[in-house]
Image: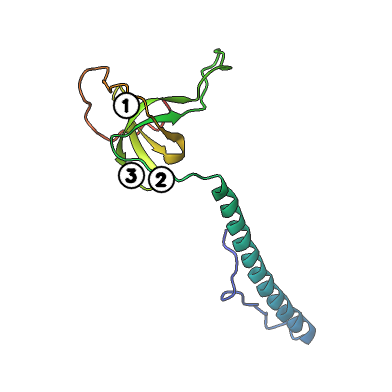
Amino acid sequence: MVVPNEGKLKAKISPDIQDADQVQGLGKLKSSLIKAYKEVGVKNRTAQQKNKADCNKKAKERKFEVNDKVYLFCLIREPGRCHKFRSFWNGHFIIVQRSSDLNYKIIDKKGMEYAVHIYRLKKSYDQIPWNFENKRRPRHKITTKYRDP
């Protein structure tokens, strides 16, 4: 939405308005709007900083390397099945690539590749050897499937 800011806030006065009270009223309106926009900007910045601080209280610093074994957090439930004792951590996956500080590409044993956020990953400390189900390492091509396994 385009809103007027301080620089573009100009009162257009038609030439047929010659009343000084109306001109003075428009000037007061302009100054009060400028003051309100500045105050709203300050309040938005302080609210954003507070929300960021609240969010970062529970955040854990996580770092993974390529070829680390990880579990993937998945809340998707299959319809018609009991999920009372279900684990939400699926695995095992291997990290193939670090896309950014927060996003990683992981691969499962079937060779499917997924792009996931770091908060959905948990390091696996199992000593289970990694074996692909099709007995060959898949090609690392980027897929556009961004669904949970």
State which mark lies toward you, 2 or 1: 2
Residue plotted at (25% across, 34% down): 141
Residue 45: percent from the left, percent from the top? 59, 62
Residue in the foreground of this view, choosing between 111 and 63: 63
Asked whether the beta carbons under mark 2 and mark 1 sit within 8 Å of each other, the answer is: no
Identify the image's colour scheme: rainbow, by chain, secondary structure or one colour.
rainbow
| Residue at the right extreme of this rendering | 21
Labelled disc at residue 102: 2
Indicate which disc, 1 or 3, sits on the residue closer to the N terminus. Answer: 3
Depth check: give the residue in front, 31 or 51.
51
Does 43 sit above or below residue 137? below
Q: Residue at x 23, y 26 (%)?
A: 138
Which amino acid, mark 2? Leu
Under tag 2, what secondary structure?
A: loop
- Labelled pair 1, 3 in contact (Cβ < 8 Å): no
Residue 49 pos. (x, y %): 58, 58
Tell me the residue at 29%/38% (across/down).
66
Residue 99: image tag: 3
Of the two numbered discs 2 and 1 on the same chain, state the one appearing first in sequence: 2
Locate the C terminus and report the quarter of the image it occupies: top left
- Disc 3 secondary structure class: loop
**In the rendering, at what x and y percent does residue 56 appear?**
54, 49
Q: What residue is shown with label 1?
A: 112
Q: Secondary structure at mark 1?
A: loop
88 relative to 33, above or below: above
Dividing the picture into quadrants, the one containing residue 145 is top left
Kindly indicate the quadrant of the structure image that contains residue 111: top left
Q: Which mark is residue 4?
A: none
Q: Please tell me in which quadrant of the rendered image residue 18 appears.
A: bottom right
Depth check: give the residue in front, 56 or 25. 56
In whole angstroms, how far apart are the C-alphas of marks 2 and 1?
A: 20 Å
Left or right of 9 on screen, residue 124? left
